[in-house]
Image: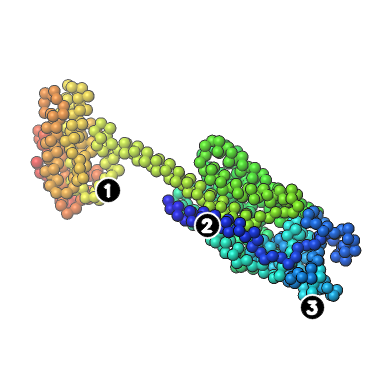
Amino acid sequence: MEWGPIRLLVLWLVAAFGLAATQPAFAAEPSARPTCHATGNAAEDYAAIARDPRRWNCTTSDWSVASAKSFLRFDLHPATETPTAFSTRLTRFASIRVLVIGQDGTMATRRVTEHEVTPVTDDWMMSIDLPRIAGPIATVVVEIEGARHTGMISFAELTGASDRGSLSHELLIAGLCGMLCMPLLFNFAFFRVLRERFLLWHVLATACMLVHTLVTSGLINRFLTLDIVQLSLASAFSVAGGIAAASAFSADLIEPGKLDPIQRRLLRCVGLWMLPVTLIYLFVDGGLRPYVAPFYLGSLLPPMGLFVWVMVVAWRRGSRAVYYQAAAWTPVMVTASIRIGSALGLTDGPIEMLVAQHYALGLEVVITSLGVFDRLLAIRRERDLAVAEIRIIEEQSERDPLTGLLNRRGLENRFETLRAEGYRAMAVLDLDKFKSVNDTYGHITGDAVLCAAAEALEPDLDTRAIRLGGEEFLLLLRGDDVVNRAERRRQAIATRIAARVPGLDRMVTASMGLVEMPDDGGMRAEFGVLYGHCDRLLYEAKDAGRNRTMREKMQSFGGLRPRAA
């Protein structure tokens, strides 16, 4: 397993975190932030609000989108750089009316819908060019109708240019997105080999996080022209898809026996929770509009709680994979908890932490990828062990337990391979009058005789010895002088038995039937045909007085020439 690219990605993320920490804000310093803010109903305009100073809140707290309209007033100091654009958090809305009032009392207005604003390229922000007037600007008033998130008013600012572009930030995000593509390639490659379902879930989760990072960082606006409706859809559905895929990924990744069935089912059902929640967040309007953003962020708490529960249970049961999951998801859940808490009113205004979120997601993908590799190694070890055990069992099933030679099953399974490897002679041997040895000396002595006969057959690289059953053996031979090599082994049987099994009152000899193919080819006949010829020759040797060899050389499939050894 090559860990070099993963180490590189980890080091890159650490460096990116360090660089992000030294740059508290990537965007240019705004020309102005709201001096005061107010709310009003759908029929009211700025003139109606301006007549009652008590309706204005000139603090940086109590931001609200509960009313139909929100008003922001920017009072500019004469020394302030002349702003050219209004920028704020990218959020869906009904309309925005910008009123610019000059120091000489001249006014200019501009009204836009959500399809007419310009998304920026280095943040989850949108920008509207201010209408122009001839002289210096004294006040800018922004009237927002149908805002769906308080961040739209708390993050509002006037800037010196419509494009906030911060090249260093864009390069960091581009590098992060590029590095996030590596796990996609790895997972597809591994899936072709191991076919594990959690690899596909990891691909989907990583792809969703990649899309979310591209969209919410603004980098996607460098390459595609999307309006804020399309960007909002891409952002929300990538979050929902990422959480659903990550949950299913965890359900399949964590080892068997480390979670209860109910926990795995709940993880796989997270997508059924996220889909309706996302649809509500995107499309519910009217009286419920002010509450959809807090509801949406609050709806992330149940999946987070499920993740914590799953990680605790798996950790207590000794899961190895859960350590990677805990390390990967902790930064994401910390940043998400801060955002949710601020959206639910625990702070004066919503805390976005988008830069921290981008790097938390990147770190999650990297650590999860390490967990995937670790799990794949464990699966490969398990499969290698299982394959080795199967091979041992198969090997044992193809071996004669008494002599250690191949048995008939092992021979038949390998016969085509052996024939292709050039074996061109087959000999069948049978111990003469072996039954009388068993009857006289018992089966223990008989087994010793069989083992001694197997030793005498001396299998080597060019000779295969097989015990067919009982006192019958078979030889396959290749190379030169196959007849004499087989005959030497047959004659060695009697000598080896006499040496290994003392106390016998007779010589135990062997008879043999041998079929030899021409020197220019291997065994071109099937096993059954060759064995039938050898068996016939063996019985001819028995009938001729035993302790001898009868052989034939096959000139063609139809012609055999008998010879006696």
How far across and down, in percent of the image, does residue 209 sit? Answer: 59, 55
Q: Which residue matches tag 2?
A: 12
Q: Tag 3, which secondary structure?
A: loop
Give the farthest residue toward the bottom. Answer: 134
Amino acid type, label 2: Trp
Name which residue lies at 71% across and 56% down: 282
Q: Are marks 3 and 1 in contact (CB under 8 Å)?
A: no
Name which residue lies at 71% across and 48% down: 341
How far across and down, in percent of the image, does residue 299 sit? Answer: 69, 47
Name which residue lies at 79% across and 65% down: 74
How far across and down, in percent of the image, does residue 77 sit? Answer: 79, 68
Q: Tag 2, which secondary structure?
A: helix
Q: Which residue matches tag 3?
A: 134
- In terms of sequence position, does the residue under pointer 3 or pointer 2 come before the other? 2
Amino acid type, label 3: Ala
Q: Nearer the viewer, residue 3 or 182?
A: 3
Q: Gap between marks 3 and 1, in whole Å? A: 94 Å
- In terms of sequence position, does the residue under pointer 3 or pointer 1 come before the other? 3
Q: Which residue matches tag 1?
A: 417
Camera sees residue 451? yes
